[in-house]
């Protein structure tokens, strides 16, 4: 296992002291150390992985120093365009060190949304010409691997990648900065989800976002003894649940479609607000549960409490926008959403955190899709 502090200090000796990326649970201990040990402007948690590659490029152009860009391997897709059309040696040739958490590593148990990405990741990197080295819990001496990668990065003016298996880093408890973002809203995400589900009608459709939101929706349906046919759980594809819902809302005008989104996910694909607001289906009801954090992967802060979601939604053309943070407020706002024409936008501010014993959907994505389509196509 690797001590986050040791790797951080080693990278510093190699001239790397600027960090950006999107959090991943496999990288949490290292990234917490980076947060505690870097000035704010040297560690920027970004909206999506492509934006992080671009930010690292700007850092290199203005300092001559390569940055480190961290991501879960599911973020590689978001990063591919800037990696191929900006940083690649055949374009501008911008060196940077990618640190990629290997979800779905073959032979290890993981969730369905990670399996394919885990299988194809090394092949993807090979095919786009990104040299990589692998660190795991068995790695004791990483210096040789990192030296080789950094030599290659500087010689070729190219991004290179460190692949990180589960359990590579020793644990590290965040001391300062992220804890400052802890809010004292009374409800947590799961409380808000329950109030929403209890107050919409049984015909309404839910499209829920990636991470714990979909897990909590699934478990609440189980608890209530309801089926899962009204819910599409967007287990992967972070940031895209609102467009899945938009596609449904346009086709199924007689159904109310509720999007249950997260602040990190909305920020990751914020352009979707413009499309939902301008397409403007009346049955499109967008709810963002804002805990100011990437709660599902460790609670790292988002810009969720720094920006004004409702003003942004209004400017994008949503017909009504509102916010709530307690049970009565949520009930009132859901009631308004149910009885007025959309597209509507509701921001619910909550504290971060989840139950320790939160499970995972026990049905497969295929079962979820079939039950959901069966419900929609018979409506
Ligand atoms: C493209 C991509 N990057 C990163 C991840 C890892 N990831 C899963 S859930 C999540 C946090 C989502 O944050 P938010 O939408 O605010 O919801 P919360 O977890 O706070 O409820 C992240 C970063 C991912 N699934 N996909």
Image: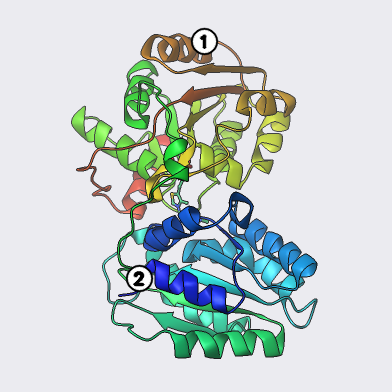
| Label 2: element kind | loop
Residue 106, quarter of picture: bottom left
- Residue, x 26% and y 49% (percent of image)? 363
Judge from the rendering whether residue 11 lies leftward or rightward of residue 136; answer left or right: right
Residue bearing the label numbered 1: 336
In this view, 81 is above or below 144: above
The answer to whether any part of residue 280 appears in the image is no
Q: Nearer the viewer, residue 289 or 255?
A: 289
Q: How many marks?
A: 2
Q: Around disc 1, counting alpha carbons within 10 Å, would you say few (fewer than 14), some (14 to 19), or many (20 or more)? A: some
| Residue 378 on image: x %, y % | 42, 34
Residue bearing the label numbered 2: 3
In this view, 103 is above or below 154: above
Quadrant location, the C terminus:
top left
In this view, 322 is above or below 175: above
| Residue 38 on image: x %, y % | 54, 57
- Residue, x 43% and y 55% (percent of image)? 32
Q: Around disc 2, counting alpha carbons within 10 Å, would you say few (fewer than 14), some (14 to 19), or many (20 or more)? A: some
In this view, 378 is above or below 370: above
| Residue 188 on image: x %, y % | 35, 28
Display coloring: rainbow
Quadrant location, the N terminus:
bottom left
The answer to whether any part of residue 59 appears in the image is yes
């Amino acid at each position: 296992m690797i001590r986050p502090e040791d790797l951080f200090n080693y990278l510093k000796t190699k001239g790397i002291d600027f960090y950006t990326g999107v959090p991943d649970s496999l990288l949490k201990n290292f990234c917490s150390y980076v947060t505690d040990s870097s000035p704010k402007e040297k560690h920027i948690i970004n909206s999506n992985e492509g934006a992080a590659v671009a930010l690292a490029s700007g850092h290199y152009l203005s300092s001559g120093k390569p940055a480190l860009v961290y991501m879960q391997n599911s973020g590689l897709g978001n990063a591919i365009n800037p990696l191929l059309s900006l940083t690649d040696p055949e374009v501008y040739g911008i060196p940077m060190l990618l640190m990629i958490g290997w979800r779905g590593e073959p032979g290890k148990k993981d969730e369905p949304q990670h399996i394919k990405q885990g299988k194809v990741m090394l092949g993807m990197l090979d095919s786009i010409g990104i040299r990589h080295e692998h660190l795991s819990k068995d790695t004791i001496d990483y210096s040789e691997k990192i030296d080789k990668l950094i030599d290659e990065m500087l010689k070729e003016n190219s991004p290179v990648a460190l692949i990180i298996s589960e359990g590579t880093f020793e644990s590290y408890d965040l001391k300062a900065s992220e804890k400052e973002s802890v809010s004292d809203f009374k409800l947590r995400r799961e409380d808000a989800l329950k109030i929403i589900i209890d107050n919409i009608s049984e015909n309404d459709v839910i499209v829920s976002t990636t991470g714990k939101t979909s897990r909590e929706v699934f478990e609440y349906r189980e608890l209530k003894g309801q089926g899962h046919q009204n819910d599409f759980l967007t287990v992967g594809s972070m940031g895209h649940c609102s467009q899945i819902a938009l596609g449904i809302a346009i086709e199924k005008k007689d159904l109310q479609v509720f999007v249950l989104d997260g602040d990190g996910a909305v920020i990751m694909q914020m352009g979707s607000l413009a499309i939902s607001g301008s397409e403007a289906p009346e049955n499109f009801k967008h709810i963002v549960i804002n805990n100011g954090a990437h709660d599902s992967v460790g609670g790292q802060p988002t810009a969720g409490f720094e920006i004004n979601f409702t003003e942004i939604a209004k400017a994008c053309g949503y017909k009504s926008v509102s916010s709530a943070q307690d049970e009565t407020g949520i009930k009132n706002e859901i009631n308004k959403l149910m009885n007025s024409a959309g597209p509507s936008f509701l921001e619910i501010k909550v504290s971060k955190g989840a139950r320790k014993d939160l499970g995972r959907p026990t049905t497969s994505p295929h079962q979820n899709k079939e039950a959901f389509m069966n419900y929609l196509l018979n409506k």
